[in-house]
Structure formats: structure tokens, C-alpha cells
Image (cartoon, rainbow, N blue to C red):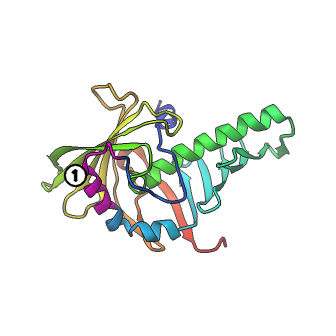
Amino acid sequence: MFQKMILLLAVALFVSKGLSAQNASDPKAVEIAGQVMKAMGGQKNWDKTRFVAWTFFGRRRLWWDKHEGLVRIESFADSTIYLVDVGKETGTVKRKGVVLEHVDSIAKYVKRGKSMWLNDAYWLFMPYKMMDPGVTLRHLGTEALAAGNQADVLQLTFENVGDTPENRYKVYIDQRTHLVVQWDYFAKASDAEPRISNSWDNYSRYGKILLSGDRGKRGKLDDIAVWKKMP
């Protein structure tokens, strides 16, 4: 069930450079999202970050060239390797050591690889994506965290972006650190209760940006690496 729920998570459209949220967003929410970006290392350092790798809950390994829009995914369970140009939606796929040659099969698995990347990357990079085009932000108020300090709560909804734009998120941002400490995922914007709720813990510096791979009881995105050049 958990694996299915992970794959259902919607994501905002990934682009190489973060842009301002659309005008429909709440100015207070945009201000807070900007504070998050600054605390995480800033827009300039995020834009300069190019090569990133991580393992998604022990299920697959991803290498992403953020500047060129190229991703390599190694799926451990079915021994499949995806090489995908996410912008052009083209690529090469090898299953159990055999390179796919049929056009329809290649298209099917390239699409699947892109969806994996969209989902898996949002689990790691969401704080940098809150002001992307098509994202509408709302400041819902403040709530007390378990430690006693206050968190600003932002709502994220989407328009014409990602695989599942009907999703909604509530994102909790520690007022002291300006870092995301929790998110709630709603499969439909109209849902009253979240399908997934988990923490964002143990931020670490990679290159010149901060990332959190610890999702509390959900598990971890681990073996995170950031390079200026591929090793």
C-alpha cells in the first residue's frame, strides 16, 4: 500500500530554473516560500546545481543532469534501466539486460521513467519548487509543532502541471529556521483528510544547497550526492 501511495503523489512541473509563482498566489505565502528558498541556499545556488543523485526509498537509484534535463534511473526490483530526456520525452530503456527496440515499448517505458523522475524528485526537491509556474500558494495560518515552536502552513495547488494536477499539499514551515518540516498530501484538492502526512527531517548541506532525505516513519531518500561534474 505504501509503495502505491508513493507513486500516487503528484508533482509540479520540473524546470531548470525556478520562477515566480503565478499572480493568483497569496503574497504572504509567496513571501514565506521565498524565505524557504533563501534558507535552503538561495535561488542562484539552486539554479547552478547541476548533477544530483539519490536513492528513492531503497527502490531505485536516480542520476539527474538538471541543466540538460537528462535522467538515469535504475529500478532494482525489475532490473530496468531508463535513460530519459525528460524535455523531449525520448530515451533508451534496458530491461533485464536487453535494450528495447520496439517503438511503442520504448515510448511506454520512457513515459514511465519520466513519471518516476517527476514523483521521486518532488519528494526531495519540493521546497525549491513552490514558486514554479502553475503553482498557487495560500497562507493558511500557523500551527504549533510538537517541539512547541510555530509553523506557517502553506497550501499548494496546481494548474496544468505535472502528471496529476488535481492534488493538493499542505506544507509546514518552521518559523525559526524557515525550513519545511512536514507535508500533507491530498489526492484530490477537495479531500478533507490527507492520504499521506510525514516529516522532513535532518537537513544536510550538499554543495551549496540544503536537502532533507529523512521522511520520518516513511523512510529515507538516501545516498544523496551533488556534483559540479559527474564523477
Which image quarter holds the C terminus? Answer: bottom right
Q: Is 158 displayed left or right of 191 in the figure?
A: right
Image quadrant in which you'd find residue 194: top left
The amino acid sitting under disc 1 is: Lys
Please, is residue 13 above or below residue 209 in the view? above
Q: Is residue 196 magenta?
A: no
| Quarter of the view holding residue 185 | top left
Disc 1 element: helix
Q: Position of residue 106 (x, y in %)?
A: 78, 38
Tell me if residue 36 comes above or below residue 195 in the rendering.
Answer: below
Where are the magenta residues, as a range?
23-36
Q: Residue at x 57, y 67 (%)?
A: 50
* Predominant SS along the magenta part: helix
Q: Which residue is mark 1?
A: 28
Please state the horizontal and vertical placement of residue 28, each as a whole percent of the image: 22, 52
In-front residue for pair 59/228: 228
- Which image quadrant for residue 65? bottom right
User: Residue 30: x and y, percent?
Assistant: 29, 53
Q: Is residue 23 left or right of residue 14?
A: left
Residue 25 versus residue 51: which sits nearer the camera?
25
The picture places residue 172, in percent across and down from the top left corner, at 26, 49
Give the residue displayed 69% in from the left and 44% down from the top. 89
- Number of other residues with Cα within 10 Å of mark 1, as a class: few under 14, some 14 to 19, many 20 or more: some
